[in-house]
């Protein structure tokens, strides 16, 4: 039985004081979330304050990106070990906004996945097709290519610290969600891709989140799908009531 994982991706939102206010709201509601694992991905500037406020409470701190090099002349970048030092549990890699707006490639994402795992972080590996790719009938080929590239060279043991997030690009921040059936089809294909590369046991254990305009009103139908193990939540994670409702839904699955 896979434990569902819901993570809020705050993107470039929330000052430190706003972040702490949201964290306080979530900490008050933690006992409603049941067995679901819950994470939040604040901007870099709030990571330390958020980690300190959370203390030992079961709320996973996630960074939204990092560089694959350990250190060096990379102005404006942050290394995996820096994230570890401030107490991050996960790092989100390969988000479509990073791929589309900042030119990240499958190869670069793969290097980041390796560096994150080497540093002791767990990884949320995001992937998904654009609308053009879906309309051309290329969805499964695209996500399988991104999956293979992102997981290339990992051991089955390392894979245990990777969560995959399927996020159709056309559903991110658009209010347009994949139907549960569309999402399930891709999740099943991704799980079968993991099975081919790592074996059936690894595939049965890997968690695959769905992301793309998940909100309280559509979460239950998505999370009821057999291969959907929680969600990566953007807009709805910025409001304590909406995010809590999504987490409760995943916990009730
Ligand atoms: C995201 O950015 O990962 C995301 C899923 O955003 P939204 O929920 O706003 O579509």
Image: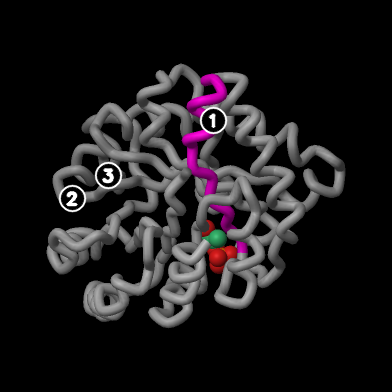
202 with respect to 184 (left or right): left
List x then y, in percent, for residue 242: 47, 78
Q: Which mark is residue 87?
A: 2
Q: Is residue 205 magenta?
A: yes
139 with respect to 206 (left or right): right
Q: Nearer the viewer, mark 1 or mark 3?
A: 1
Disc 2 crowd rating (10 Å Cα; few below 14, some 14-19, many 20+) is: many
- Secondary structure beneath label 3: loop
- Asked where in the image residue 195 lies, by quadrant, the reply is top right
C-alpha distance separating marks 3 and 2: 14 Å
List x then y, in percent, for residue 83: 23, 46
Residue under label 3: 78
Query: Residue at 20% of width from left, 38% of height from top?
Result: 81
Q: For the residue with label 3, is its CB less than 8 Å from the closest atom of ligand 1?
A: no
- Asked where in the image residue 59 lies, by quadrant, the reply is bottom left
Query: Residue at 26% of width from left, 79% of height from top?
Result: 28
Residue under label 1: 203
Disc 1 crowd rating (10 Å Cα; few below 14, some 14-19, many 20+) is: many
């Amino acid at each position: 039985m896979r434990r569902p994982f819901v993570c809020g991706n705050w993107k470039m939102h929330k000052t430190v004081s706003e972040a702490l206010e949201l964290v306080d709201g979530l900490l008050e509601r933690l006992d409603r979330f049941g067995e679901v694992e819950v994470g939040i991905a604040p901007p870099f500037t709030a990571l330390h304050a958020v980690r300190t406020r959370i203390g030992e409470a079961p709320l996973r701190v996630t960074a939204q990106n990092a560089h694959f090099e350990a250190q060096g002349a990379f102005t404006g970048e942050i290394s995996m070990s820096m994230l570890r030092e401030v107490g991050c549990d996960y790092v989100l890699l390969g988000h479509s906004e990073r791929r589309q707006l900042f030119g990240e490639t499958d190869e670069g994402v793969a290097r980041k996945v390796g560096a994150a795992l080497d540093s002791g972080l767990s990884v949320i590996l995001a992937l998904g097709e654009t609308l053009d790719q879906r309309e051309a009938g290329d969805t499964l080929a695209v996500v399988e290519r991104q999956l293979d590239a992102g997981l290339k060279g990992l051991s089955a043991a390392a894979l245990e610290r990777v969560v995959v997030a399927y996020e159709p690009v056309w559903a991110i921040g658009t209010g347009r969600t994949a139907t549960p059936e569309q999402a399930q089809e891709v999740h099943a294909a991704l799980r079968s891709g993991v099975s081919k590369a790592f074996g059936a046991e690894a595939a049965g254990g890997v968690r695959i989140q769905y992301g793309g305009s998940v909100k309280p009103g559509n979460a239950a139908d998505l999370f009821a799908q057999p291969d959907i193990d929680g969600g990566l939540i953007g807009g709805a994670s910025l409001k304590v009531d909406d995010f809590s409702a999504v987490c409760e839904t995943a916990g009730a699955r």
